[in-house]
Image (cartoon, rainbow, N blue to C red):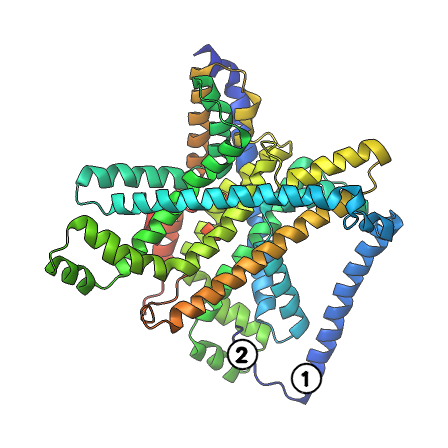
Amino acid sequence: MDFVRENSDLFLDAFLTTLGLSLLAGLLALVLGTLLAAMRVSPIPPLRGLATFYVETFRNTPLTVVFFFIIFGLPQIDFVIGFFPGAVLSVGLYTAAFVCEAVRSGVNAVSGGQAEAARALGLTFGQSLREVVLPQAFRTVVPPLGNVLIAMVKNTSIAAGFSVSDLSSLLPRLVNADAGDLTLVLVGVVVGYMVITLPSALAINQIERRVAILR
Amino acid sequence: MTTPVLFDVPGPKARRRIRIGTAVGVLVVVAIAALVLVRLAGNGQLEPQRWAVLFDPASQVPQALGQALLRTLQVAIVGMVLATVLGLLLAVGRLSEHRWVGVVVTTLIEFFRAVPLLVLIFALYFLLPKFGIRLSAFWALVGGLVLYNAAVLAEIFRAGILSVDRGQREAAYGLGMRKTQVMTLVLLPQAVRRMLPVLIAQLVVLLKDTSLGFIISFPELLRGARGLVEFFTLQFGNQYTFQLYVAAAVIYIAINLVLSWLARYAEGRTRRNAKTAATTPTELPADVQMGGGGGVIPAAR
């Protein structure tokens, strides 16, 4: 029990780091991903091309490589970034590609009549997207979007490889503990992640039920 | 791919606006690209001799990158084969008629899906030695990948087995086949054929995840590039750092694009094949495509 008491601060710190990283990166991914989705359905070809290029690139690049470019690559263009902000940026940029795909599938799922009616009323592209299509699209993509965000929480663990003291980093950092204590650390880390993911999953189920459109 | 109903066929005014938008968009992209290039050029990153090293056999760089790539592929192939086998076993176990087998297997699947992949790898690499089981970085990486991907594949196979028409199973039983025969001779062959595109897509995810080996210092592609960087930095200062990282990233992206293309090709074939034509196209859920650990919402599956 001494071991637990000695390291409780360390554990709390690590947990809060993972939580903060998840929240900030999730926010970035949602905002950027929605923007990208809007770009992919916009009438302006270069915007569509740019968004498609972004999504295809990030979907086919390992997150570790994204981390690499942000942490070690950006300094090459005189843009030095700290480890934690770098981790937020990496996870956020990577997840945005998947958020974009989720939102776009939602946009495609909104029945064509809705957009046609919006156009018939004289709404511009931006208006029909903001007022008519996206609000409905978001409702249908709550479960996939939620899954993407939960997977993102687990992906934040890769930050442990880039000098961020998050939950996952506890295992290598406390590696000198004996077998029993290190097992406790593992259990603590797994529970730590579940404390974030399981309530999120429940909340997403709730939200899904609340906003579902009855057709 | 896009939904053209979102905007009208543009008239003359809208066309002008689109042209202006196009020009602005192109300008912004060009400006960003130019800024990056200027910065890179300012730091001398674009000098040809810095890039030439990537293709010059005398520098040993192509060989070293090739070997690193080989190790990455090795991990991916061993991992994929083992994960497929284990995934099949888990899928069959989950569908078992013995209730307790189903419960145990379901718990295992859910556990391995809920834990971040990196934590699994760390557990194999740092924790197991404490209990006297020493795994090399290779097997720790493969082990983590197998456990996680087998759990995902088990769910995919289960969906595949359940999607086979009920009449197939009933006919097989009617012919007097035993339970095992029905599964191995009738259900699994059809399920696997149906799930081939998804299997290839999962290979893309697994290949991406092999880069986690970097974190436990397994010399895969990324660590190989990093090793070269460290070697060169000692000798010539960090001349080639950026170039080597770009090379590693380009290799990853190229392989994954080819695999994604292969998955689409297999999908097309599956749909044209009379034996599987009736199946609806399947795609990996987005959270699985992200790698590193999937979602945990059972209701969404």
Q: Can the viewer see residue B272 in this picture?
A: yes
Q: Residue furthest top?
A: A2
- Please, is residue B173 above or below residue B7 in the view? above
Position of A98 with respect to B220 (left or right) is left
For the residues labelled 2 and 1, the Cα–Cα distance comes to 15 Å
Q: Is residue B167 left or right of residue B292?
A: left
Question: Chain under label 2?
Answer: B
Label 1 packing within 10 angstroms: few (<14), some (14-19), many (20+): some
Residue furthest to the front in view is B58
Query: Dot 1 falls on which chain?
Result: B
User: Image quadrant of residue A59?
Assistant: bottom right
Label whose residue precedes the other's in the sequence (2 or 1):
2
Nearest the viewer among B196 and A212 is: B196
Q: Please, is residue A116 above or below residue B177 in the view?
A: below
Q: Position of residue B166 (x, y in %)?
A: 19, 62
Q: How far across and down, in percent of the image, does residue A35 sit? A: 60, 61
Q: Quadrant of residue B271?
A: bottom left
How many numbered marks does the figure carry?
Answer: 2
Which amino acid type is shown beneath numbered disc 1?
A: Arg
Question: What amino acid is labelled 2 in the image?
Answer: Pro
Q: Give the residue displayed 59% in from the left and 34% down from the top.
A: B218
Q: Which mark is residue A50?
A: none
**Residue of label 2:** B4
Disc 2 and disc 1 on one polypeptide chain = yes
Q: Which residue is mark 1?
A: B15
The structure residue drawn at horizontal position 45% and vertical position 16%, both measured from the top left corner, is A179
Q: x, y (%) of residue A168?
A: 53, 31
Marks 2 and 1: which is nearer the front? 2
Regarding mark 2 in the picture, which secondary structure is present there?
A: helix
